[in-house]
Image (cartoon, grey):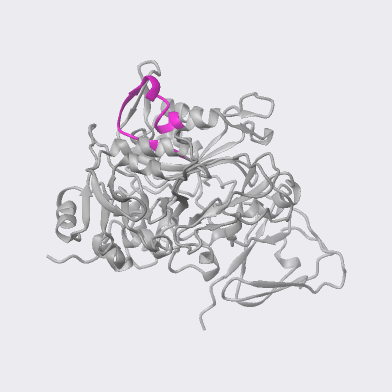
Amino acid sequence: MAQSSPVGFLVPLNSDLSVDGAAEQVPILPGTNSFGRNNLGVVDRRVSRHHIILHASEGGAAELAVEAKSSEILVDSSFATIRHSRISDERSPAAFRLLQVKGIPSWANSSAVGLQDVVQGNVIFAVLSNYMVDIDWLLSECPFLEIIPRVLVIHGESGASLDIMKMKKPSNWVLHRPPLPISYGTHHSKAMLLVYPHGLRVIIHTANLIYVDWNNKTQALWMQDFPLKNDSAGKGGCPFENDLVDYLNSLKWPELNVSYESIGQARINPSFFRRFDFSCAMVRLVASVPGYHTGSNLKKWGHMKLRSTLENFTFDDDFKGSSLVYQFSSLGSLDEKWLSEFASSLSSGVSNDKSPLGPGKAQIIWPTVEDVRCSLEGYAAGSAIPSPMRNVEKEFLKKYWVRWKATQTGRCRAMPHIKSYTRYSGQRLAWFLLTSANLSKAAWGALQKNNSQLFIRSYELGVLFLPMPLQGSHLPASFSCTDDNGFEQASPNPKGTLVGMRHTCLVTLSGQKTAEETDSSDHVITLPVPYELPPRPYTSEDVPWSWERQYTKKDVHGQVWPCKVQLYMERDP
């Protein structure tokens, strides 16, 4: 009889609640599990051989009982605690979610979403921005996109793929490929703008509009709904609004006319989106636009936009000199000079005493060959992790490599297509960026001409989570485009006290409980960061994945690499 798959793990922690990478994680199986002295890395006779009994269900729920004769429960750095990956709606900044993955335990998808969960309701106009678009799959997943009055698809396809798109697109769709004035640039941004009769839904995510990206890989999205402005709204836009409209203007799409319920006929151009109230946006936009950016535009895009945004925020002293994580799925041609330039931007910001946070140690999360071979897709997953050998095998990169480990979210075997960057201390986050941008000069830009010019090749788009200040006795009212009532008052803070707080506190799933207990003056926002922090360094046995190598050891599907990979649904000849 085949052994059941684990529904969770006991995860060993250090005293600061960071994951103890030197100790084994203990799988939790459906049914009754017994844990005790034999599961510890040290000998302690205060712990019996069956100290804890844990009854777990297939769905990930668990009941814990202490069976030891002694009433003393040992709690120290060598004992494990349960890592529960569920995140409740009221803790979410509007919505930051991992995408659902097929083939992982049900508990790992309990708070994850699929395409149908976010693209829904009475949409009258849609902007779908992406790099790759499989129209056959997209319409099979969301058939109502065929009957929305207007759909604008902003894409990065070319050649035969674009010809197929033109042939298969519904009559209500308009295809637009933004101008790419610089060679080797791409339109890589992944976003959706869904216009409803009384509001706008903004979704920024990391997945191409193809089957494998929404089913087999670690991905994420951020979503928030915004109402129409009322008569009392000021004329000037908030930073989120201005950044969004500036970015949309760069795409130069053709104007479209749509019948809009509240105002009649409307021309859909970038300025149209100023009709919506973005004042409650819980994130900042960080975008890249191709070009040579100078003067007032120098800090408008790419890593210089991230630098200028972080420079204006004050962070807790814990983040002085703290580590940086770069996590992405395509490795550009890097050099040490540019990595120093990039790290300088990501190290920006000041502490409470107004002194700079200072540089932090950079860590690059990158899958190993074994990670890819043993993944849900096997070697086929490596086709979405572009990595020429000349880029991967640079000697100076060895000090940066750290492992992809996502045990606490059940996604170790779901290879990452998510792109994220963060600065952390323990399980607390100074900030967190979810983006389409891989680690490359083309995506982030490179300074030129004595740092007076930023050169960018590609379009990218991301959202930056920051310790935003909150004022008043409750959280802001939340607006829903798909709810009949429109507005719902967000819950007070989880402890039931007033939210007269200085700022929000960003934490990982692993740090949620401790932050709530110790940071009573902060509103704790839990972000479902899929990977472990701190990440584990490569060992001498680990080899970074490169898609140009040949691998003859068979994967979980009996394949070797290279092998044929199908990214689009079967297409008619």
Q: What stretch of residues is rendered in magenta?
A: 285-305
Question: At x 70% / y 60%, what residue is drawn?
Answer: 80
Task: Please count the marks in the image.
Answer: 0
User: Outermost residue toward the left?
Assistant: 573
Could you tell me residue 555's position as x and y percent?
Answer: 38, 63
Q: Nearer the viewer, residue 97 or 233?
A: 233
| Residue 413 in the figure: left or right of residue 334 | right
Which quadrant of the figure has residue 359? top right
Question: At x 21% / y 50%, what residue is drawn?
Answer: 175
Question: At x 62% / y 51%, what residue is drawn?
Answer: 21
**Residue 550 visible from this viewpoint:** no
The quadrant of the image that shows the C terminus is bottom left
| Residue 451 in the figure: left or right of residue 525 | left
Q: Is residue 288 magenta?
A: yes
Q: Is the residue 388 above or below the residue 171 in the image?
A: above
Could you tell me residue 398's position as x and y percent?
Answer: 47, 38
**Residue 414 visible from this viewpoint:** yes
User: Outermost residue toward the top?
Assistant: 450
| Residue 247 in the figure: left or right of residue 521 | left
Could you tell me residue 74's position as x and y percent?
Answer: 81, 61
Q: Nearer the viewer, residue 418 or 335?
A: 418
Could you tell me residue 302's position as x and y percent?
Answer: 40, 33
